[in-house]
Amino acid sequence: MKKCLLHKCDAHCCYNIAFEHGELERFASMIVNPVIAFTPFGCVRIAMTNMDLDKNKCPFLRADRRCNIYENRPDVCRKFGEIPELPCEYLKESKP
């Protein structure tokens, strides 16, 4: 199992996240960064919290760089760092 090195991480994986329709609405009460618009991206949509893509963090990304819906996070978030297409330099193997 891998574990995030949060003390080094700047949470860039938590920017410009594509959500399936209904995911944001299901957890609307847990949004910490207000959504101001949506950008279609294939069959999903990117929730815009800032129109500058470099500053467009996930609606659920807290100030402490933790996910407010971690147990219910989207598949893309679950796969980040686990597959070659979505690498992360701030993951390490944790001991069982």
Image (cartoon, rainbow, N blue to C red):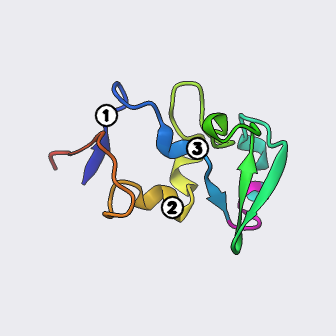
Instruction: Give, as a single range, the part of the protein colored magenta.
Output: 20-24
Q: Would you name the residue on which mark 3 appears?
A: 15
Residue 21 within the magenta-colored segment of the rendering: yes
Quarter occupied by the N terminus: bottom left
Q: Is residue 27 visible?
A: no
Q: Is residue 19 visible?
A: yes
- Residue 2, percent across and down? 26, 50
Instruction: Give, as a three-letter code, the residue at label 3.
Output: Tyr
Q: Nearer the viewer, residue 51 or 83?
A: 51
Assess disc 3: are there few (<14), some (14-19) or many (≥20) residues with their C-alpha within 10 Å of its C-alpha: some
Left or right: where does residue 80 sit relative to residue 57? left
Callout in the foreground (2, 3): 3
Assess disc 1: are there few (<14), some (14-19) or many (≥20) residues with their C-alpha within 10 Å of its C-alpha: few
Q: Nearer the viewer, residue 5 or 55?
A: 55
Assess disc 2: are there few (<14), some (14-19) or many (≥20) residues with their C-alpha within 10 Å of its C-alpha: few
Mark pair 2, 3: CA separation: 12 Å
Q: Would you name the residue on which mark 2 appears?
A: 76
The residue lying at 32 percent from left, 60 percent from top is: 82
Q: Which mark is residue 5?
A: 1
